[in-house]
Amino acid sequence: MLRVATASLCLYCRRAQSYPLASRGRCSAPGPSLEENKLTVDALYDLSVDIRKIRKLKGWVLRQSPAYVQETATLLRDLGADGAVIARVLEQHPEAVLCRPEQVRAQQELWASVCPNNRDLVGIIEKFPASFFTVHHHGNQKANIQYFQSLRLNKRIIGKLMASAPQSFSHPVERNREVVSTLEEAYLSLGGEQANMKIWLQKLLSQNPFVLMKPPAAIRENLAFLRERGFSSAQLLRLISKLRGFFSELSTDGMRDTLAYSQEVLQCSEEELREIVLKCPALLYFPVPVLTDRFQGLLSAGVSMAQIRDTPTVLELTTQIVLYRMQKLRSYGYDVRTGSLEALNGTKKDFEMSYGRLQLRQERPLFNPVAPLKASEE
């Protein structure tokens, strides 16, 4: 076991305040030693960890004492992690070996309250090791878990929030309570039903956990701005529901610029612009240079402005994707310049399915007694 009695972890954490975030660990901070801890290096070698990667990115970890390499590896192994997973975790987040075993066990118990089984927990640790090994905010983490459980949020949602936005669980619970209260207040004030609020909140938080990191004032300011632009309560509720957590990331200055630019290019009225935004909320958060590039790309490909007004969601796609899809459709006789842009929309999977159906229609023989054509395809 790799234990060397030195200053307490609290002392390390206090020292950490004077180091840049990029080089600071979760469980300790760089000590004064310039020599590597041979026991640490040897133990990591034994676990097939790429020491060169650690030296390049976080070499200071290798100079720390005490270090708990074997204890950390044993805990991960007991959870069901194999050797390859353990090596990847320690390469991504070598600071894990600086966490005291009792702290890591406490984290395991904490995460077990929101993870259905050890297999899911290992998956989270492998993908978000820094989140799991954030041990010195245990009290705040526990209080925040209890708060979200009191909202009757799904365990998986809470686990996802902890994994992808660990800072929000490190803060005092009062901060998250204020953000959630602001969201609930906005939802109800816009006509949302109390019975549906839990589902709405779960979808919002699961889509963008970082909404918890935004100041509540930003949500209120964005709502006030859009009200001034003529959006009704029902329309705002639709917008928030579509944008979900991304609504909090908008800025009034950014929205003002993009709306003014979009209205000028699309040559539409205020009312028409609102309807276009409801169809394509991305107009609110794409900066003007991005929109400029996409408008120009569509127009240069022969698409008309009237087509864009009818199907504004095509602006969510990059110019490269649009041109690629247009070319594939054209190879099977469909020219979006004389038809609808709807054929371009959707995810890659959606488009491939639509393209496949078009390809099948073109290649299928006119008469096939084994598989007769449907009436809609004749």
Image (cartoon, rainbow, N blue to C red):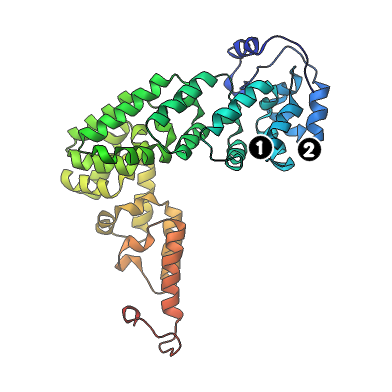
In terms of secondary structure, where does tag 2 sit? loop
Q: Residue at x 80, y 20 (%)?
A: 37
Density class for disc 1 (Cα within 10 Å; few <14, some 14-19, many ≥20) is: some
Disc number lying in front (1 or 2): 1
Q: Position of residue 187 (x, y in %)?
A: 26, 35
Residue 160 in view here? yes
Rendered view: 38 above or below 337: above
Rendered view: 175 above or below 255: above
Of the residues shown, which amino acid type is indicated by label 2? Ser
In terms of secondary structure, where does tag 1 sit? loop
Q: Please give left or right for residue 202 compared with residue 156 in the image.
A: left
Q: Which mark is residue 337?
A: none
Rendered view: 150 above or below 374: above
Q: Please give left or right for residue 328 compared with residue 247 in the image.
A: right
Residue highlighted by disc 2 = 48
The residue lying toward the viewer, choosing from 258 and 137, is 137
Distance from label 1 to label 2 (Cα)?
19 Å
Residue highlighted by disc 1 = 79
**Residue 148 occupies which quadrant of the picture?**
top left
Q: Please give left or right for residue 326 compared with residue 36 in the image.
A: left
Density class for disc 2 (Cα within 10 Å; few <14, some 14-19, many ≥20) is: some
**Residue 5 occupies which quadrant of the picture?**
top right
- Where, quadrant-wise, is the C terminus in this rendering? bottom left
Of the residues shown, which amino acid type is indicated by label 1? Leu
